[in-house]
Image (cartoon, rainbow, N blue to C red):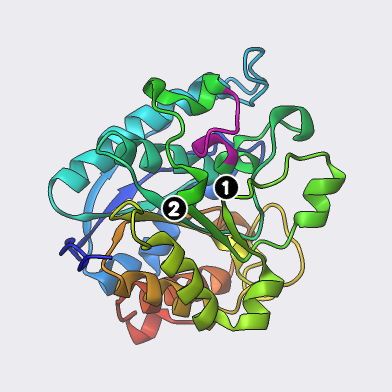
Amino acid sequence: MPDPPAFASRFAVVRAPSGLGLRASGVQRLGDALLEHRLGEALRARIATTVAPPLASGIRDPASGVLNGPEVAAYAVSLADAVGAVLDAGEVPLVLGGDCSVLLGGALALRRRGAAGLLFLDGHADFYQPPAEPSGEAASMDLALVTGHGPPAVGDLEGRSPLVRPEHTVIIGFRDAEEQARDGSQPLPDTLLALDLGAVREAGARTAAEHALAHLTRRGAPDRFWVHVDADVLDDSIMPAVDYRQPGGLSAEELATILAAAMATRHVAGVEVTIYNPTLDPAGAAGAALAGALARGLGGVLPRSSTGAA
């Protein structure tokens, strides 16, 4: 592959306090909480904007089967506008959600500007289709939606589906394959590189990251990729402050290692962080651990007073 382009390294924070993709509430405070843990300061990030979500209808859309389907789609367009403004300013958007449906906004922003890849770090595969998702939550379908395997009413934004092609996508760290199969979820496409938690542990985080990044930066691949970080990719003992808990997960150092390897490629177009629910973390230890891992992985230094349990 040719030498990587010199993408800007300065982060600009886009707050995306949307819980449209979940029935539960609380993830809307993720951005405020991580900034209180001084993540922005650690990364020397500019605070760009906040994109307020529309009011949730609270019903499953009859056309798509997705909870708050029209609102999720409309919000993705608004968020894409904000992310696009950061990209056009030569900065790297750091989107602080929010639930996982905010992925649609970042993916759409990049799709408007050409093709892009996706590094998807998540404890869940998020590949449900509406009939298999008990609550119709878009936060359980986001990977399916952006890769063209979800209902067009939500996923085919501006007629640009797929927002990311499966062959340009890598998922790392998921550990819910049995659950998704039991629920009747569609399988991940064969062209999508899937490294579950067992594969990461067998290879080691650094080697797994190298495998993933070689796939994303291979000859003929898009010259940049988006990074999705769902807090539940972390071990439950570190990150219990999520609405759908499951045992196991990456250590904070494993997450930092994978993120650092991604940043070293100089192909990262943007990063998003989702699902951490500060209302489930009254002492702030989980948030401190997440902020610390993000700071180390994305190239920052978190002030000592804010590292907490990180």
**Label 1: how many Cα within 10 Å (few below 14, some 14–19, many 20+):** many
Q: Is residue 145 above or below residue 273?
A: above
Residue 191, percent across and down? 57, 50
Q: Is residue 191 above or below residue 160?
A: below
Q: Secondary structure at mark 2?
A: strand
Q: Viewer-proximal residue, 16 or 149?
A: 149
Q: CA distance from mark 1 to mark 2?
A: 26 Å
Q: Which residues are magenta?
A: 144-151
Q: Secondary structure at mark 1?
A: loop
Q: Is residue 147 magenta?
A: yes
Earlier-in-chain disc, 1 versus 2: 1
Asked whether the viewer can see residue 236, the reply is no
Residue 180, percent across and down? 78, 48
**Extreme-bottom residue of the structure:** 304
Going by the numbered disc 1, the residue's amino acid type is: Gly
Residue at 33 percent across and 29 percent down: it is 78
Q: Main secondary structure of the magenta part?
A: loop
Residue 134, percent across and down? 79, 34
Going by the numbered disc 2, the residue's amino acid type is: Leu
Q: Which mark is residue 226?
A: none
**Label 2: how many Cα within 10 Å (few below 14, some 14–19, many 20+):** many
**Extreme-right residue of the structure:** 182
Residue 35 quadrant = bottom left
Of the 4 image quadrants, the one containing the N terminus is bottom left
Asked whether the viewer can see residue 112, the reply is yes
Q: Which mark is residue 118?
A: 2
Q: Is residue 94 above or below residue 36?
A: above
List the residue tagged with mark 1.
Answer: 26
Left or right: residue 292 versus residue 82 is: right
Residue at 68 percent across and 21 percent down: it is 65
Left or right: residue 188 versus residue 86 is: right
Q: Is residue 185 magenta?
A: no
